[in-house]
């Protein structure tokens, strides 16, 4: 027992000595001489955030707090703009609806003529199918088929422009007419192009059989004449592969590229269809609200500045339109490329829903145009770019001509909707081709993040708002111009 007490006293003494030593050391803690604040080489924390060099991004910098601040400032600014717009103009959309009803626009015969023109567009799809049935006859001249296709396309694309200029109907109906027309034209061109290739494949197979050649799939890609085995077998059933039901389904699918077969879902998801309908209606309402509440007043304010040539005030109007214009652009993207296309895909059981990629992260224009609109990009690559390449043109010339086709389509929509020919849409689209070439040359000088910032600045802050103001001014000027004798 005495031995245990002795050990306890020794242990307590050791503890007491350690505490006394710790107290003495604590008095030395934090003295300038002993506390080294700079003991190694360090880089600034934000250096890695603004650099594309992977070696400088080894330390992950969390920016959640800054993002929260920016989002909060954005919300506060938008709420302020909404309140100020309501104080200055009231709820503009209610006045627009009342004026729309009082104007008797629903009694204007020209609008009903435009609606009738919209309803006649499907006739051209029936004509396209009839042409292909005619082409399936071996005795039909190839030149006759091409002439009929060309004539139908010219009539299809000319008809809405004539209706729009002749009727001087509502802009919304005019836009709906030209959008449906350009969509139908792209679909029918793809349909004719694919069926032309099918006929060419059948003729090549017949020629090979006459020559006694045995056709077998290639060992590497397992294709015959570049066509995979399944599609090859289906194409050889021509003209039985020309199905009316399949063609009608294609006319409603959210794609512009015709195929003999599409990936299809087993059944429709009606809950998802209802969800897409609700999303489409909400997005459409927001687009209309933003346009009439936040853009039209600024456009009206800019008209006298255009008349006076006051470019400083025009620039101020451009900046005022840039924010709501960007919101409309994003909402239109969501409405068209997500809600509406997915709605059509679900209704037609179309299974390939790659309608866009992460275009918002694009580091250059080439990447943006590849990711922004897959249906149109796929059509241009398939029916414009590669045919030009096969004709022996260089890649740069083929890309330029492809952009010219896209620019012409954008200008066509502007002409058919606003009934003004100003080449703004054509120029804005075509200028992308040299800009893409410049970016390619400077890819090692200008970072991807800088290119992305320049894109947002040039497109949403300057280019798009300027186009909106110019189109509005020219439309107003045309509406108030004296009639031509």
Image: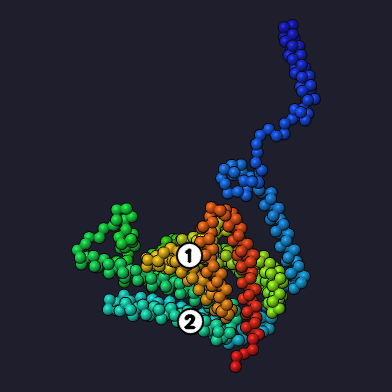
Q: Quadrant of residue 320?
A: bottom right
Q: Quadrant of residue 275?
A: bottom right
- The residue closer to the viewer here, 59 or 400, is 400
- Asked if labels 2 and 1 touch by Cβ distance under 8 angstroms, the answer is no
Q: Which residue is mark 1?
A: 377
Residue 200 visible, this angle: yes
Determine crowd level at label 1: few under 14, some 14-19, many 20+ residues with C-alpha closer than 10 A: some
User: Disc 1 on helix, strand or loop?
Assistant: helix
Residue 343 coordinates in the image, percent (x, y): 52, 66
Give the residue at the far bottom of this rendering: 485
Colouring scheme, one of rainbow, by chain, secondary structure, one colour: rainbow
> Compared with residue 474, is residue 272 higher up or lower down, i.e. above or below?
above
Q: Quadrant of the C terminus?
A: bottom right
The dot on residue 64 is: none
User: Disc 2 on helix, strand or loop?
Assistant: helix
> Compared with residue 474, is residue 395 higher up or lower down, i.e. above or below?
above
Q: Quadrant of the N terminus?
A: top right
- The residue closer to the viewer here, 197 or 230, is 197
Residue at figure coordinates x 73%, y 61% from the top left: 77
Distance of label 1 from label 2 (alpha carbons): 24 Å
- The residue closer to the viewer here, 116 or 349, is 116
Please indicate whether residue 141 sits to the left or right of residue 299 in the image: left
Q: Which residue is mark 2?
A: 158
């Amino acid at each position: 027992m005495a031995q245990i007490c002795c050990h306890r006293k020794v242990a307590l003494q050791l503890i007491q000595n350690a505490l006394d030593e710790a107290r003495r050391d604590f008095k030395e803690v934090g003295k300038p001489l002993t506390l080294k604040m700079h003991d190694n080489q360090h880089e600034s924390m934000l250096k890695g955030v603004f650099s594309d060099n992977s070696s400088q991004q080894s330390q992950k910098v969390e920016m959640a707090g800054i993002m929260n601040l920016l989002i909060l400032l954005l919300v506060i600014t938008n709420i302020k703009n909404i309140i100020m717009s309501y104080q200055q103009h009231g709820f503009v959309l209610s006045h627009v609806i009342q004026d729309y009803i009082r104007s008797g626009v629903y009694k204007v015969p020209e609008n009903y003529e435009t609606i009738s023109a919209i309803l006649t567009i499907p006739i051209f799809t029936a004509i396209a199918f009839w042409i292909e049935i005619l082409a399936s006859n071996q005795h039909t001249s190839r030149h006759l088929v091409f002439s009929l296709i060309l004539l139908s396309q010219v009539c299809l694309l000319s008809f809405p422009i004539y209706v729009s200029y002749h009727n001087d109907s509502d802009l919304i109906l005019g836009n709906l007419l030209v959008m449906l027309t350009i969509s139908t034209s792209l679909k029918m061109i793809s349909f004719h192009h694919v069926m032309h290739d099918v006929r060419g494949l059948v003729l090549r197979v017949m020629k090979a059989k006459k020559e006694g050649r045995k056709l077998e799939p290639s060992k590497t890609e397992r294709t015959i004449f570049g066509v995979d085995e399944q599609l090859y077998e289906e194409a050889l059933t021509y003209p039985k592969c020309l199905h009316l039901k399949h063609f009608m389904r294609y006319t409603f699918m959210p794609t512009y590229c015709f195929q003999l077969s599409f990936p299809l879902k087993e059944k429709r998801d009606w809950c998802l269809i209802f969800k897409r309908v609700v999303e489409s209606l909400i997005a459409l309402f927001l687009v209309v609200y933003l346009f009439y509440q936040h853009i039209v007043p600024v456009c009206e304010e800019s008209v006298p500045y255009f008349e006076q040539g006051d470019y400083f005030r025009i620039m101020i109007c451009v900046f005022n339109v840039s924010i709501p214009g960007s919101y409309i652009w994003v909402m239109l993207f969501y409405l068209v490329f997500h809600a509406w296309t997915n709605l059509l895909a679900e209704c037609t059981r179309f299974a390939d829903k790659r309608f866009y990629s992460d275009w918002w992260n694009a580091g250059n224009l080439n990447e943006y145009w590849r990711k922004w609109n897959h249906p149109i990009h796929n059509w241009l690559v398939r029916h414009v770019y590669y045919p030009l390449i096969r004709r022996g043109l260089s890649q740069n010339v083929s890309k330029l001509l492809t952009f010219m086709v896209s620019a012409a389509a954008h200008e066509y929509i502007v002409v058919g909707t606003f009934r003004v020919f100003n080449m703004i849409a054509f120029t804005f689209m075509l200028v992308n081709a040299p800009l893409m070439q410049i970016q390619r040359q400077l890819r090692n000088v200008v970072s991807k993040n800088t290119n992305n910032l320049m894109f947002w600045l040039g497109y949403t802050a300057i280019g798009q708002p300027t186009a909106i103001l110019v189109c509005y001014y020219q439309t107003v000027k045309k509406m108030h111009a004296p009639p031509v004798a």
